[in-house]
Every structure is written in C-alpha cells, then in structure tokens.
Amino acid sequence: MHHHHGYTWLGSARDLLKDGPRRPMHPEFKTTKTVPLELAHWLLKPPTFIQGTWTDPTQATDWFTAQAREHAAWFASDYDRAPQTLSAKLHRTAKAIAAGEDIVGGWYLTGQRFLSVCLISCSPHRLRPEIPCPQR
C-alpha cells in the first residue's frame, strides 16, 4: 500500500557541507541522521530513523505542519518566518502528498542550525521504485 514515511533532522548547517556521509556508499551513511543528498535515500536508512508512517495525506500533512511550526520562531529568514510563506508551503504540501510526491522542508535556523522535515513516498517510490520499503 502506498504511504509516506516522515523524517526529520536538526543539526549544524556545517554538516550539510560534508556530502560524503550523505551518500549511501559512505561508511557513515547508515548511522548519520543528516539528510541524504537524494531524498529517496532516506529509505535506505535504518527504520528506526522513521518518525511516522501515513497512508492518509491529511495525517501526513498534519505531522509535517507540526514539525515546521514547532521551529518557525527560529527560522533565520524573515521571509520564512512570515505566516503567509509557511501557510503557502503547507497548502502545497497537502496537494503533493495526495499525488504521491516527496515533500521536503528545509530551513536555516538561528545559531547556524538547519532543520530538514521530509515526507518520503514509498511502496514504491516514484523515482526509485527499486528501493524497498524500510518497514517490510
């Protein structure tokens, strides 16, 4: 059954510059929670990294919304903090999830941190159908 897995990562923005551990062939890939370079590669990470799984687009959108709003006060950009900017992103999210697309939210936060919130389509992934579901 088609569903979405939710993943979050909050860490140093400098860690995003280290692309080695963000690639599946790197020895640290399976142990680091840093967002992978390719979104579908979240599905190659351990199932324990999954924050939730949803078949209902509304429930997936609610989770994504809660994650984004929890950190919105710390978004480094005035534009990203603006309520209308976040509301527009969340509206697009609901439509994309219903269409089976991946959703990614990425925001620089104060203190040189970065927040990544992802909903990854699964069973199968649209662009990487060869990657099996991490929750068999």
Image (cartoon, grey):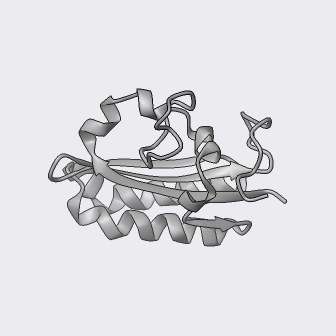
How many marks the image carries: the answer is 0
Q: Residue at x 54, y 65 (%)?
A: 51
Residue in the foreground of this view, choosing between 95 and 52:
52
- Picture layout, residue 101 above or below residue 29: below
Q: Please provide percent x and percent y for residue 15.
A: 30, 38
Quarter of the figure with the C terminus: bottom right
Q: Residue at x 75, y 51 (%)?
A: 133
Q: Please provide percent x and percent y for residue 42.
A: 58, 45
Q: In which quarter of the image is residue 50?
A: bottom right
Q: Please provide percent x and percent y for residue 112.
A: 18, 46
Q: Please provide percent x and percent y for residue 58.
A: 64, 70
Q: In this view, does 32 lie to the left or right of 128?
A: left
Residue that lies at the very extreme toward the left in this rendered image: 111
Q: In this view, does 7 lie to the left or right of 71?
A: right
Residue in the foreground of this view, choosing between 19 and 93:
19
Q: Which residue is drawn at 52% across and 56% down?
A: 7
Q: Which residue is drawn at 23% across and 65% down?
A: 73
- Picture layout, residue 77 above or below residue 54: above
Q: In which quarter of the image is residue 41?
A: top right
Q: In this view, does 23 lie to the left or right of 71?
A: right
- Picture layout, residue 68 above or below residue 42: below
Residue in the foreground of this view, choosing between 54 and 100:
54
Quarter of the figure with the N terminus: bottom right
Residue that lies at the very extreme toward the front in this rendered image: 27
